[in-house]
């Protein structure tokens, strides 16, 4: 029954991807963005132990990765203590198979036993928020810079751009696909992934993760972006005006076990 439900869920995901902005298709790389919301009584150490010693090693054993793990930077202003986990999948069918493989992995079940033995009164986190994204034409594959994990000062931004409706959402995707990303690169904003939402709490939207060598370089990169001549031209294109209704921005630092 569980396997049937997973297959039905992935079939629904395939159908949703077919309606995304072209040329997205059923072979698009997918990104699962999980947010382990800790709340006031969450046990961050327990979640870290589960992710670093059970889930991520199991994913790695089955060729799934690189997996990113991040939490709020000291200067993040969202107020929600969360551990974000980014899991890439080759396509929807691979995602369904990956879930089944992990659940049937006996080593994973053993390594995660203590984590799942906790009950309602001593749970490790409040809830898990989830979003599924399909890679966009402008950045079709997850890219992790060489030796990035050696830099202990690196910081990240996870941004979600909501749109009021699907048409405006497609136009924002079009804006990224036709000019915004080269400006990012020119300003020192390094994408790890960029995806259009298939399912999630803020659809229609796109979400992306970017990396910076330091907090100072992050601030300078966005200053350069706002002042970039190409951005000033692109942002004034009539059809792109009003495409974003709300922005969610998290400033993040990597967990020691992050592969991104």
Image (cartoon, rainbow, N blue to C red):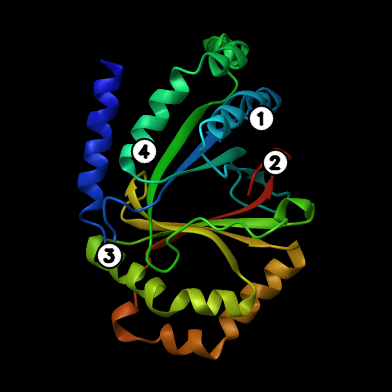
Residue lying at 73% horizontally and 69% vertically, measured from the top left: 217
Point out residue 64 in the picture as x, y percentages from the top left corner: 51, 38
Quadrant of the rendering where the N terminus is positioned: top left
- Does the rendering let one see residue 243? no
Task: Please state which of the two labelled residues, at mark 2 or mark 3, is closer to the viewer.
Answer: 3
Q: Tag 1 or tag 3, which sits nearer the N-term?
A: 3
- Helix, strand or loop for disc 3: loop
Q: Which quarter of the figure has residue 85?
A: top right
Is residue 213 visible in the rendered structure shown here? yes
- Residue at the image position 26 percent from the left and 24 percent from the top: 5
Name the residue nearer the viewer: 246 or 143.
Answer: 143
Do callouts 4 and 2 mark residues in contact (Cβ within 8 Å)?
A: no
List the residue tagged with mark 3: 23
Q: Is residue 65 left or right of residue 197?
A: right
The answer to whether marks 2 and 3 mark residues whose Cβ atoms lie closer than 8 Å is no
Q: Give the Cα separation between the discs numbered 3 and 1.
A: 36 Å
Residue 255: assigned label:
2
Instruction: Say which label, 2 or 1, has the lower sequence index.
Output: 1
Mark 1 burial class by Cα count in 10 Å: few <14, some 14-19, many 20+: some
Residues at discs 2 and 1 in contact (Cβ within 8 Å): yes
Is the residue marked by circle 4 packed among few (<14), some (14-19), or many (20+) residues within 10 Å? some
Q: Secondary structure at mark 1?
A: helix
**SS of the residue at dot 4?**
helix
Q: Which residue is mark 1?
A: 52
């Amino acid at each position: 029954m569980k396997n049937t439900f997973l297959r039905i869920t992935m079939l629904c995901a395939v159908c949703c991807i077919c309606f995304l902005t072209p040329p997205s298709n059923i072979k698009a790389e997918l990104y699962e963005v999980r947010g382990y919301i800790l709340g006031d009584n969450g046990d961050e150490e327990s979640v870290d132990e589960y992710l670093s010693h059970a889930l991520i090693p199991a994913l790695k054993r089955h060729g799934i990765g690189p997996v990113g793990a991040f939490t709020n930077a000291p200067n993040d202003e969202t107020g929600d203590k969360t551990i974000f986990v980014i899991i890439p999948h080759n396509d929807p069918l691979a995602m369904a198979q990956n879930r089944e493989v992990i659940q049937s992995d006996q080593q994973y079940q053993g390594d995660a036993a203590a984590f799942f033995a906790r009950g309602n009164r001593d749970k490790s986190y409040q809830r898990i928020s989830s979003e599924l994204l399909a890679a966009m034409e402008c950045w079709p594959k997850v890219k992790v810079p060489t030796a990035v994990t050696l830099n202990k000062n690196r910081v990240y931004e996870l941004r979600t751009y909501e749109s009021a409706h699907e048409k405006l959402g497609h136009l924002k995707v079009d804006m990224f696909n036709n000019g915004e990303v080269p400006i990012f690169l020119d300003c020192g904003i390094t994408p790890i992934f960029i995806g259009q939402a298939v399912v999630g709490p803020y659809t229609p939207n796109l979400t992306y993760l970017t990396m910076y060598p330091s907090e100072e370089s992050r601030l300078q990169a966005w200053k350069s972006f706002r002042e970039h001549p190409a951005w000033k031209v692109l942002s004034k294109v009539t059809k792109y005006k009003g495409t974003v209704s709300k922005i969610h921005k998290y400033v993040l630092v990597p967990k020691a076990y992050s592969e991104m």
